[in-house]
Image: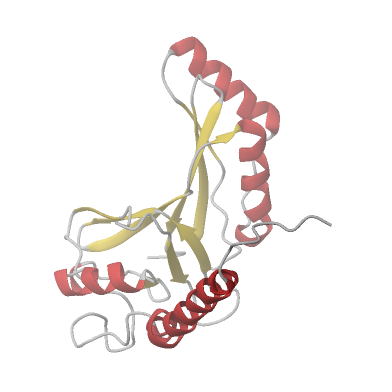
Amino acid sequence: MAIVNPHRPEWVRWIPAVILSLFMLGVVLFALIAGPRIAAGPGPAQEGQVTDLNWSVFTEDGLQFIESARTPRIDLSSPPVDAVEIGLPADGALTVGPHQTGLDYRLVLIATDAEPNGALFTTPQFTVNSAGGRLESVRVEERGAFTFRETFLAVSERAPDFGYTPPTSQQLAQAVTDARESGRPAVVRTNRGLDAGMGVVAETTCFGGGFCQLSFIVTPAVG
């Protein structure tokens, strides 16, 4: 039997084991030091960053906490919602996102004091619109672009929760065709569903390249 590297020093054989041990030690130290910080998140909100009932506000301090925690919460249960009280302009629009890390927000909208009770959206960006001193709507964007068939599945999946009637795949395919022929995006909107205790319209914007973008437009049920 041939002997491989017969003149190699004995200690050389221990190098891989030493490297592996150092790597494992580094992993353990990271878990002990950085792990708890990651799990802990941004910590509780400070005074002025949320309302007394822990709802989000859109002041400078409130937006700072939203960017830190990525868990905005909007109370739509007692419309009309006073826009100025939660830091919004009396008339205008305020967009939150995209987040500097590229991560999504977990947007919670509470609709009523009873069931059904609002919805959770995972979104890269949302816009809160106000008019006449009242919060009028929250426009929630879905991440990325889809084929019209993927869009149909995405819109249909949430229809039972929100109560709107989803468009057919043929309608979405026609929107892509219309966009291609006109050179302008074509928009398909559902009716206003109320099954979640708030108004929800699914809006699909299709482009000539064959892709669509999906948004949900949420309004208080009354007020």
Q: Quadrant of the C terminus?
A: bottom left
Where, by quadrant of the figure, is residue 168 drawn? Answer: top right
Q: Is residue 198 visible?
A: no
Q: Is residue 156 left or right of residue 143?
A: right
Q: Quadrant of the N terminus?
A: bottom right
How are the residues colored?
secondary structure
Give the residue at x 42% y 64%.
Answer: 220
Where, by quadrant of the figure, is residue 166 drawn? Answer: top right
Q: Is residue 142 left or right of residue 132?
A: right
Q: Is residue 196 above or below residue 54?
A: above
Q: Farthest residue in the top direction?
A: 181
Give the residue at x 51% y 14%.
Answer: 180
x and y, in percent, of residue 9 in the image: 56, 69
x and y, in percent, of residue 103 in the image: 41, 59
x and y, in percent, of residue 16 in the image: 57, 69
Give the residue at x 48% y 49%.
Answer: 142
Q: Farthest residue in the right direction?
A: 1
Where, by quadrant of the figure, is residue 26 drawn? Answer: bottom left
Give the residue at x 45% y 70%.
Answer: 108
Q: Is residue 6 left or right of residue 176?
A: right
Residue in front for this viewpoint, 44 or 189:
44
Residue in front for this viewpoint, 194 or 117:
117
Q: Is residue 218 visible?
A: yes
Residue in front for this viewpoint, 42 or 63:
42
Q: Is residue 37 above or below residue 221?
A: below
